Amino acid sequence: MMLLDKSESGVELTLAFPLPNRMIPGFSGGTGQTSGKPYTYVTKTGRDIGEAYRSIQSDLSRKITFGQASVIVVGEQLAQEGMQSVLEFIAREPRFHINANLFVLNGKAVDLATIPAVFERFPSEILLAYNRDHVTIDATTNDFLKAFYYGGDMILPRLKFEKKKIPSESSAIKNWMGTDGAAIFKQGKLVASLNKNEMRGALWILGQLKDAEISVRSHTDGKNVNYMINRSKTKIHPVINGNQITVYIRTKADASLISCESDVNLQDREQEVRLEKGIEALVEQRMNHAIASVSKAGSDAYQISSYIDWYHPEAWKRISKNWREIYTNQVHFVPQADITIKRTGSVNKPLKIHSPESEDAN
Amino acid sequence: MKKRTYSRKTKGQWPDSHNTEASGDLFEAHIHEITQQLADCSDVVYHSFLAGPDLKCMLIYLHGMIDKKSLQEEVLQGILEVKGHDPVAFRNDLFLRRQLPVANYQVISVEEGISSILEGKALLLVEGESRAIAFPMLSTNKRSIDEPANESTVRGPRESFIESVDVNLSLLRKRIITPDFKTEALHIGRKTQTKILICYLKGVCKPELVHEIKSKLSQIDMDGILGSSYLEEQLDSAPLSPFPQVQYTERPDVATAAILEGRVAIIVDGSPISLLAPVTLFMLLQSAEDYYQRFIAGTWIRWIRYLFVFISLLLPSVYVAITTFHPEMIPTKLLLTITASREVVPFPALIEAFIMEISFEALREAAVRIPKSIGQAVSIIGALIIGTAAVQAGIVSAAMVIIVSFTGIASFIIPHFDLGLAIRLLRFPIMILAGIFGLFGIICGMLILYIHLINLRPFGVPYLAPLTPFVKSDMKDTLVRAPWWMMRKRPTLIGKTLVRQTKDSRKWTPELEENGD
């Protein structure tokens, strides 16, 4: 794991290393907690990443290899200054896995060194699991490098800390890490952020949603019907009509019923269709919020430029010179959701209490 | 049939037959000559008797090599029953009209008589006759036909060749019933005069192949041929290559299949292993079992075998290369486990691999010679105690023990023992290359190996056929084992004619589908 911060003289680099001599199997020595954690962090500052890296290497008894670095966390200040130097170093190092995940942290990235690793062996595994389970945006170095060719606008996930007391850990208050929305980049610099709800809308647009929970109000009695959405697929398709660019964002997903408080008849297909329309309206609303926040920042974080280049290359050649202006003013987004309710769970009718007094011919 | 000759140190005096007055002397002289040649051979029996019109006869044979019963019943009784009042008529009956009830006895000169005695025939000398009769009475103890020791199958026949070349030939003869099945005999070896049979199917086999084999074999000038492997070294076209260029088998059905494909089988007297030439790499990776199972099972087992050939050759090298030079190629969790287990080991990965591999080779060699009674206990000691103790003492890492044992198992999957040996040997240079140059070294080593294999052409057949040069119709038996009703042609590079069976041997199937359903 690589943590990057801005310091007065340049960059502060923190590298996380696993300690194999504390992990020897079959030894009755340290089992982890008593003799120390099996990982450590080393921090050095330098004019740029290369210099900081060499000064770390000169301290260590082992050779640093970037071949297993799969997570890069950038502090907020460095992100605001620009991601160019970071990505330059990463792109050139041949051993770096170019699909390493990128994160932005509120505050200083080096604070990540203080979080406890409760469920996993190493903190980097926690961050990798965020990506694997799609709880937040999945952004890799590869994606950001591709974005550089279209203006350098990108959306990255954000992390935050919370001071909490964790029951299983010994000492008092610890930093508990969590996800917190997304960070919007314009020309490689951090300009705005999305809160958690807007970030969920961004997940819909990017098609990275694993599952989402949506509550829709039933039209019969206004009570909540809760659905779990899985298997969403998103297709972004720009259509150019003269000067007007319309971007259709089509999402298809399946919905499964989790719980139902209302007494709407779920066996009736018509009622189901109306509920589906309710869900679709909610999804489109989420997507609209996400698009609005991004457009307000003036950034093309969803890479619409690349879609236009793919679908209409001749038009792109015309537009690309004034793309930024066109994007903020003329591009019109139309999100369209298509949700199908597939399952109602193991029970057909909502659970009700049948009081024995009012039993008729049932 | 090539006549047998042998070189004798002393040239004896062979009196001629014109001197009929000294016929008694002729007889004595012959006997004297033979006795001198075979002096100090305590198993020679000289049985003299009078027969017919009181002619002196002498029966000479080797004690342990004669079927006594037939000798007595057929030869002695037969001679004693031949009526003869006139010596000339008597001799005529025996020598010319062949009245004795013994099959296939030959009238030969007395010079050839000595080698025929040594071959196990009984020699009859009659007074007044310059020729001799040799009765083929050979009966030595033979092993019975048993299950093949090294090539057992689950579903196939369980007969195997034995040491007698006549019995082996009969096993082939009863399987191939056509007059085109030719068996040519050679006698090779100055002192052993071993009988060697070259068996092939005329019309299917290329005549140049037979000619080449015969010319190579006839150039052998050794004291003795004790087994078929002596011939194998002579037949190799690249003797310095580690790869075998002649296949061997002890199963008559495998030999039959090879003959039917147009290859040549060479049977050697005194060895139950017959040689099959020519051979390609893929034939060495096939086992008889593939053909007796159904084609899906056969194909699956074949794929497992191909996978394990690569594992046997490359697994330790890839492990050494990746852990030394390319740790970024394996997932992080696996890398951490390996690193943690290698943390206490004082040797670099290459040395550790060498120690383990060489110990394994030593174990394998020792296992061949362990007496059966302590074999079990020693294997338990070797595996559990030494292996576990070595890991716990920190001399080798657990991952290395796993890799070496896996490689060892993989090398036993190869059906042909010589090929398995070759791959075992080649594993070491590739390991050294991996330890010095990483994956790049492995690739270079494999390229050199590949170039070598391409250049191997035993008997003119490319070693890597049918993969290179690519023959599409032969691929049915290489990567998969196509069902028998799909294999219509013989392998093109070996046999002459192509079509083996009728076009559609499952003609009955469409009718069934119409009726059934």
Image (cartoon, coloured by chain):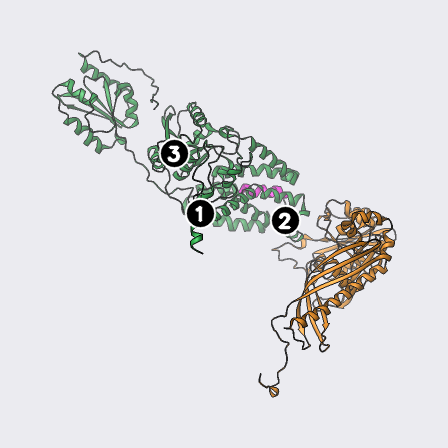
Chain colours: A orange, B green
Residue where numbered disc 2 is placed: B342
Q: Chain of mark 2?
A: B
Per the model, the C-alpha gap separating discs 1 and 3 is 29 Å
Give the label, 2 or 3, closer to the camera: 3
Q: Note whether A235 is above or below B3 in the view shown.
A: below
Residue A259 spot, x, y in % from top left: 67, 73
Which structural element holds mark 1? Answer: loop
Q: Which residue is mark 1?
A: B293
The segment highlighted magenta reads: B346-359
Query: Could you tell me which chain the residue with mark 1 belongs to?
Result: B
User: Under tag 2, what secondary structure?
Assistant: helix
Name, please, the residue furthest toward the left. Answer: B85
Q: Quadrant of the N terminus of chain B?
A: top left
Asked if the magenta segment contains residue B409, the reply would be no
Q: Based on the displayed image, in which of its 4 quarters is residue B53 positioned? A: top left
**Which numbered disc, 1 or 3, marks the residue that appears first in the sequence?**
3
Q: Looking at the image, is mark 2 or mark 3 earlier in the sequence?
A: 3
Tag 2: residue type? Arg
Q: Position of residue B145 (x, y in %)?
A: 34, 40
In the rendered structure, the residue with mark 3 lies on which chain? Answer: B
Instruction: Say which quarter of the image contains residue B157.
Output: top left
